[in-house]
Amino acid sequence: MLEDPAIKKFFNEDAIRLNKVTINANIAEIYIKQKNYEKAKLLIHYTIDNLIINESTYDSLMLAHLLYNLADADIKSNNYVDVEKNLKNAISIQLKYNNLQDYNSYKITLAEFYYLTGNEQEGRETLDEVMIYAKKYNNYILEKDALSILLRYKKDDYRTNFIRYEKLQSQKEMITRVGGILFFIATVVFFILLFRQKSKEMSLVKLFQKDTEKYYNSIMNVQNELAETRHLERKDIARELHEGVLNRLFVTRFLLMQVNKDSVEDHKNSLINEVKKVEHYIRGVSHALANDDEFKINEFDQLLEDLVFIQNRSETTKFHLYLDTNICFSKLSNKYKVHIYRIVQECLQNVHKHAQATECNVSFLVISDTTFEVVIKDNGCGFNTDIVKKGIGFANIKGRIELMNSQLVVVSIKEEGTKISFIIESKYIQDQ
């Protein structure tokens, strides 16, 4: 694989060589574990002779590692000729780079070699050096490994060494258990904190939704109050026109009709006609001001128009609103208006963020006298409905639609667009 031309494009020759060294060392260790010592030794000799070509830090440390594996394979295959030389070379390299853990670990293997070849004094002295280091730095792993050699080859102080070995083994098991318990506790604490954080986020979202609904309710209440105030003002103006201006004009017309002077006679009819016109005009204004059907402003219509108009600040997507002229929003409660407004707003925001559409149409279509349909349709890239249904925004939309006893319909086709629709039936509104 390392000879693949694609690999050579990204790595220089030295990096590939060092990777080969590491891979070969790992394969050699596998051979040793499989007791295939000859294959391991052949691979190690090949790696040392052909791939270790300089004295860089990594090359030197890998050489030490390979020499140690070679000595280990020789010991296990009872071939002791080059074991001492290879181990001492590996030990000196580890000491040179102050890698004391491997330095002492290699010395334990050297001590085992001394015991196997009958050189007990050298073996004991080597193990004593390791034991001093292990006790000084509380390195229980090295001390335990050294004790295992003493228990295997030296019967002096066997009881003392055995008790110490068992104690270290118990400590190791205790550390493992304590580590496992601490890891479990840390995992539980992590998930508890994660759950609390998610719960806090959801609480904030719900609080924000509640505050938003209060805000829109207050807007609609203010608009209702403004509408009532305008209605009262129009009635006052109509009454003033009817009782004040019209009466005065009627008196003026009546007086003009009584004039008989020659100078006035020529103009009387024209004056009367003009006054009639003014009277007729003002009466028309009076009736219009008093007529709610002609002057009533549907505030929810305006909110929807403003919402869609604001979206057209985007240069990439053109938004359109169609309101069926037969729709009567006055039957809707404030809660329904808030739900519909927020659903449309969320859908338009999603079009901005994700759809990559050039056009989006929002339509309110009459189905019957008591039913109308809301449709938001774009020509964007579409999406996977199974994934989106898991999002918070979609859950909010679905929750609002269920509160209106309706059902959400989502149809999305890749590269063709998305259509979101729901139906409102006025028969359910009276229960709200």
Image: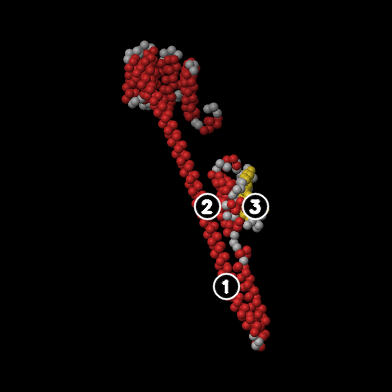
Determine the CA span between mark 2 and mark 1. 40 Å
Label pair 3/2, CB-CB below 8 angstroms: no
> Which residue occupies the extreme bottom position in the image?
262
Q: Could you say which is closer to the camera, residue 100 or residue 403? A: 403
* Residue at position x 42%, y 15% in the image: 75
Check disc 3 and report the residue beneath it: 371
Crowd around label 3: few <14 · some 14–19 · many ≥20 (10 Å): some
Q: Nearer the viewer, mark 3 or mark 2?
A: 3
Name the secondary structure under disc 1. Answer: helix
Type of amino acid under label 1: Glu
Q: Position of residue 219 (x, y in %)?
A: 53, 57
Q: Earlier in the sequence, mark 3 or mark 1?
A: 1
Q: Earlier in the sequence, mark 3 or mark 2?
A: 2
Q: Could you say which is closer to the camera, residue 408 or residue 431? A: 431
Q: Earlier in the sequence, mark 2 or mark 1?
A: 2
Query: Is residue 65 left or right of 337 when viewed as pictured?
Result: left
In the picture, which quadrant includes the N terminus?
top right
Name the secondary structure under disc 3. Answer: strand
Check disc 2 and report the residue beneath it: 213
Check disc 1 and report the residue beneath it: 240
Determine the CA span between mark 3 and mark 1. 41 Å
Q: Position of residue 303 (x, y in %)?
A: 57, 57
Checking the image for residue 339, the label placed there is none
Type of amino acid under label 3: Thr
Q: Position of residue 225 (x, y in %)?
A: 54, 61
Label pair 2/1, CB-CB below 8 angstroms: no
* Residue at position x 56%, y 66% in the image: 232
